[in-house]
Amino acid sequence: MKIAVYGASGFTGGLALAESSRRGIAAVAVGRDAVRLSESADRAGAQDAELRVAGLGDHAALAEAFRDCDAVLNCAGPFALWGEPVVRAAIAAGSHYVDTTGEQGYLRHVLDTFDADARRAGVTVVPGLADDGGPGDLVAALVAARLGDIDDLLVADLRRPGAVSRGTARSMAAAEGAVPLEYRDGGWAAAPADDTGRTIVVPGEPDKAAIASFALPGVVTVPRHVRARRVRGAIRAEVAALFGSLSAEVVESVPERPDEASRAAARWLMVAEASDRSGRTVRGEVTGTDAYGTTAVIAVEGARRLVADGAPAGTRTPAEAFDPADLLGFLEASGASWRVEAA
């Protein structure tokens, strides 16, 4: 098995190289700069990784870089700016594709645009295999399975503010200004701008947390496999305020790589809460530490499963491509925990 990591010279790409090496999976580091690729492979302890230079502007070269790879793992964001050429090249090369995007608009674009091409090529495209979109989509599927006719399903990212990488800050800044979507009555609509003052129970905290509408990946992915009248997304209001204050100067001042102590101390928490028309409610929670490390684990494992186990060709969400409980159970070895129960 051979997996290409595009954007391997970046922070998340380096973690993916390290995870591939730890798992004994042959990795090909692909990017624009041979020196940076070599430095990243050394830092990741993946000195055996093959290095291939290919830029986004040369489709033929990029497809050739992926040609003998079973899957492509794309870690180079902001994906709305740089993601589409990598998807196209992976499909042209006949390689499965996964990425670590959390950008709602880009996710919707990939799922809607590349399904037919991926089917013709006989490959599976699974965007959004990161610490938010992956666990959020998987646990929402398990919550929905406990109910029949779902009236409302909320996907919430309830982590507190913490250290982020420069790449994450760039993606958040690129998404700033885009109107968050919600799924309502069979179609897409803008989330209400005045949807404030809501609170939610947070496990382990004495008080409810204030939340605000946000463009989470699950709002786009969950309606693909869950029948619900409404699907919406939210984050802590304090985190939403921080994202809203990101300027270009602030973004570029963010360190490229958060230090390991900050990563280990930060806890991520994804919640899916659904209710039916009778008012019965089921809630699912997935949590862990080191969000960036978790992203590398779930993305590499997703790519591995596509190659080893297969999935239906076309564009798929995490819960459509993989067994939700089995993949969440796999993450337990990396310190994650999850549960689904009546609220």
Image (cartoon, helix red, strand yellow):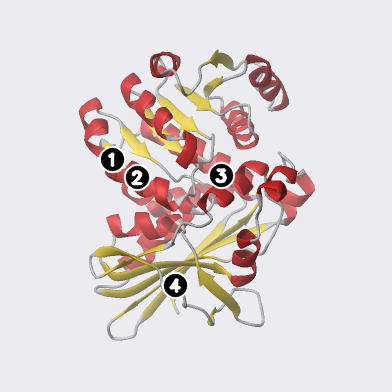
As measured in the structure, the alpha-carbon distance from the residue carrying label 3 to the one carrying label 2 is: 21 Å
As measured in the structure, the alpha-carbon distance from the residue carrying label 2 to the one carrying label 4 is: 29 Å
Residue type for callout 1: Thr
In the image, taking residue 329 as reference, residue 169 lies left or right, namely right
What residue sits right under mark 2 in the picture? 109
Which residue is depicted at the point 35% across and 49% down? 108
What residue sits right under mark 3 in the picture? 295
How busy is the neighbourhood of tag 1: few (under 14 within 10 Å), some, or many (20 plus)? few
Which residue is depicted at the point 35% across and 58% down? 222
Please tell me which of labels 3 and 2 falls first in the chain: 2
Residue type for callout 2: His
Estimate the x, y position of residue 45 in percent, counting from the top left: 69, 24
Q: Are marks 2 and 4 in contact (CB under 8 Å)?
A: no
What residue sits right under mark 4 in the picture? 283
Q: Secondary structure at mark 1?
A: helix
Please tell me which of labels 3 and 4 falls first in the chain: 4
Foreground: disc 3 or disc 4: 3
Please tell me which of labels 4 and 1 falls first in the chain: 1
Q: Is residue 151 visible?
A: yes
Residue 255 higher or lower than 287, as above or below = above
Please tell me which of labels 2 and 4 falls first in the chain: 2
Residue type for callout 3: Thr
